[in-house]
Amino acid sequence: MKQRSYSLATTVQKALRLLEILGQKQPARPTEILKQLALSRSNVYRLLSTLQEMGYVEKDIDSKYNLSFKIFILGNTVLRRNQLSDIARPYMARLAEICRENVNLGVMYEQKVLYIEKIESPHYLKLDRPVGRTDPLHCTALGKALLSGLTNQEVEAFLRSTKLVPYTKKTITDPEVLDRVIRSVRRKGYSVDLEELSEGIHCIGAPIRDLTKKVIAAISISAPAIRLTKGKMKKLAVPLIETSLEISKKMGYMESGEIKEMNGGVRIH
């Protein structure tokens, strides 16, 4: 075997090995990582704290750790390797043909929506949200769909730690109102943004789940309010939810029941 002309940086090795273990076991407690790394408790906590401070891992309210989407931003390949964008794109394209408006795919990153894929509207007048951009969670359809996947405790933690900044006169800035909206999204299966982020812009979104039934992403339709009216949103809610379900199934999600016939049951408030 060829001899290395350099010595490996052991701290870097340990940090990368920790990320590999976390990728396999996430969410994981430090004690679970400790067993596989053969390091002292203080070393594991120090590595986790450093990686968390640098944004590569995230700690949830149960003191478990997950990989963050900073890895995606760093290499712009993480989600493609996990096939989410590749799986979602043809379904997004089909939905775009139906609605003739922008279709967006986003994930939660650092308490924001990170846009990772989009199909552009053929119209000249459209909402431009480039891949790689972030927007707030509380006033976007994608964001509300992503928040609907959190537990009640996680939503409470989000509302305590996040200032609900008003972007327009219609932005929800009352935590209690937003909490009710998130609960409503869980029941209905879709979310709306009625000029809450940008005046004159409407959006409707739905969550995407994986095999653990966890919300891992969201899909949305966005357009000027003059085209994406409440009436049109009502009609598009069904194909949007169906599209999110199809992508979810491709990501391993197993549905417990079938989508119910809506027949006028979709209401846009």
Image: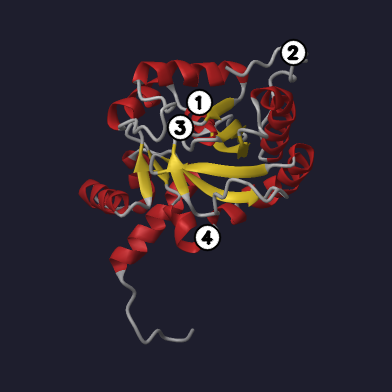
**x and y percentages locating residue 221 in the rendered image:** 64, 37
Residue 204 point in image, percent of width and height? 61, 31
Q: Residues within 10 Å of mark 4 (few under 14, many from 20)?
A: some
Question: Could you tell me if the residues under marks 3 and 1 are in contact, i.e. CB atoms within 8 Å?
Answer: no
Name the residue carrying label 3: 139
Q: Quadrant of residue 208?
A: top right
Q: Earlier in the sequence, mark 1 or mark 4?
A: 4
Marks 1 and 2, the one that precedes in the sequence: 1
Q: CA distance from mark 1 to mark 4?
A: 26 Å
- Mark 2 highlights which residue? 264
What x and y, as percent, mark residue 108? 47, 41
Above or below 19: residue 175: above
Query: Which secondary structure, mark 1?
Result: loop
Q: Do the residues bearing badges 1 and 2 touch, measured as CB atoms within 8 Å?
A: no
Q: CA distance from mark 2 to mark 4?
A: 41 Å
In the image: residue 87, left or right of residue 15: right
For marks 3 and 1, give the one nearer the viewer.
3
First in sequence: mark 3 vs mark 1: 3
Using the image, determine if residue 42 lies above or below residue 77: above
Which tag, 2 or 4, sits closer to the chain's start?
Answer: 4
Q: CA distance from mark 3 to mark 1?
A: 13 Å
The amino acid type of the residue labelled 4 equals: Asn
Q: Residue at x 54, y 49 (%)?
A: 129
Task: Find residue 91 and report its horizontal and vertical position in percent.
Answer: 74, 43
Q: Earlier in the sequence, mark 3 or mark 2?
A: 3
Q: Against 42, is 27 above or below? A: above
Q: Secondary structure at mark 2?
A: loop
Query: What mark, if any, has residue 148 been given in the picture?
Result: 1
In the image: residue 133, left or right of residue 250:
left
Q: Secondary structure at mark 4?
A: loop
Measure the C-alpha gap from mark 4 to mark 3: 26 Å
